[in-house]
Amino acid sequence: MRKNEGGGSVVWGLSQVRQVGRSAVRPVVRPAFRAWLVLAALSIFPGVAAAESASSIPNMMRPEATPAHQIFSLTLFVLLITGAIFAVVAGLLTVAIIRFRSRNSGTTIEPPQIYGSTQVELAWTVVPVLIVAVLFLTTARIIFAIQDAPKPKNALDVTVVGHQFWWEFRYPALGIVTANELHVPVSPVDHPQPTFLKLLSADVIHSFWVPRLAGKTDLIPNHVNTMWIDPHKPGLYLGQCAQFCGAQHAMMLLRVYVDTPTEYAAWVRNQQKPAAQDPTVAAGRTVFETQACMNCHRIAGTAATGTFGPDLTHLMSRSTIASGATTNTPEHLREWIKDPAHYKDGALMPAMQLSDQQLDQVTAYLATLK
Ligand code: HEC
Ligand SMILES: [Cu+2]
């Protein structure tokens, strides 16, 4: 497990929520309201998310990359305008209810009715049209600013493929393929190094959403979408598939590790190595290569070249399995291989009916794939 994710406990106490507030949130959102926001965020991000450290919580009120910052300021602007409208309407309503209430006089005579006042009608037509125009134009400006941002030469390219119910990440220039945990270099404001994502789908529509980094973008079959992120601070950022894509859509969690330059270089070096070849686990490798595992999974440098499931070449470099359904420990791996439905009912990996001995062997083999 990485150093930045040790601290969290499964149930979030209010003291932790306050701590989050003190350390990083600008005082835009009051603490009590913030606690509710965190609870709301947690209810959308189940599973492992609940056990993560404070800074990982997927909260769009705490942006940490340019697209997310722009969306957040737009959010505040829209809230300001709609909040003002609410205050005016609610205020007038309250005045009307109190001042013009029925005074028990016993009469049922209606107050004077006003028809055909051009001034009043113009006012309640023109003012809303202007408000909508302002909201529309500011929103369009931000959408285009994010969409048309030029791609610098030093940008990192990653291809993201959405699968039912996991994420595939390919780094074409680096020859890396991995799953569910995206590593990108930090992009400091003074010398940015953004990551440009090319979004594809292997089956149905998914949606890539890491609230602290950017807005949602769909992954659509037979259509290429793009988005970019430039996370300013290293750390772990959690996200989630934001499009209902099937039974386990809610267990399609995303982890974006924003690495310092040294961490990132070390990660790349490790991912580029061929898979470990440990002779002491040869029996497990034989199980893997004879029990159909290799038809669905790739382990670089071996006969396993399947692409239906996640690439397992450096499986143990990931801290979770099955898209965040559980943490990556040998016990969990064994349980997963024995019966994927134990963690993820409806996952598209069959229970392979291995014997206890085969399970032990194949788990021991996988555990060497660092
Ligand atoms: C029919 C194709 C198929 C077969 C056969 C198959 N798997 Fe899988 N496997 C998958 C899919 C799909 C996933 C992703 C499930 C998800 O996260 O929803 C997966 C996930 C995994 C994972 C978790 C990887 C990660 O990083 O999340 C491991 C480990 C794994 N399989 C091992 C095995 C082993 C060992 C065997 C053989 C005993 C095997 N698989 C057989 C399709 C398959
Ligand atoms: Cu999905």
Image (cartoon, rainbow, N blue to C red):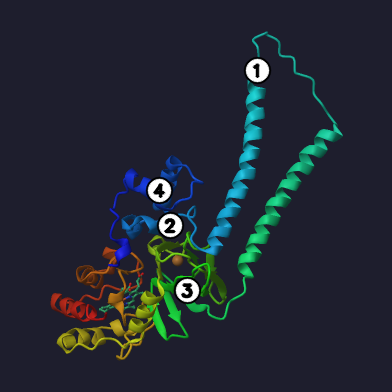
Residue 40 placed where, x, y %?
43, 48
Residue 273 placed where, x, y %?
32, 87
In this view, 31 is above or below 55:
above
> Could you tell me the amino acid type at mark 2?
Pro
Q: Nearer the viewer, mark 2 or mark 1?
A: 2
Circles 2 and 3 in contact, beta carbons < 8 Å: no
Q: Residues within 10 Å of mark 1 (few under 14, many from 20)?
A: few
> Could you tell me the amino acid type at mark 4?
Arg
For marks 2 and 1 on the same chain, the one whose residue lies earlier in the sequence? 2
- As drawn, the label of residue 58 is 2
> Could you tell me the amino acid type at mark 3?
Asp
In this view, 208 is above or below 26:
below
* Mark 2 residue CB less than 8 A from any atom of ligand 2: no
For marks 1 and 3 on the same chain, the one whose residue lies earlier in the sequence? 1
Rounded to the nearest angstrom, the CA distance separating label 1 from label 4 is 47 Å
Q: Which residue is the site of mark 4? A: 22
* Residue extending furthest toward the left: 357
Q: Residues within 10 Å of mark 4 (few under 14, many from 20)?
A: few
Which of the 4 image quarters holds residue 151?
bottom right
Rounded to the nearest angstrom, the CA distance separating label 2 from label 3 is 26 Å
Circles 1 and 3 in contact, beta carbons < 8 Å: no
- As drawn, the label of residue 101 is 1
Residue at 56%, 63% (x, y): give it: 67
Q: Which residue is the site of mark 3? A: 203
Label 1: element kind:
loop
Which of the 4 image quarters holds residue 118?
top right
Circles 1 and 4 in contact, beta carbons < 8 Å: no
The N terminus sits in image quarter: bottom left
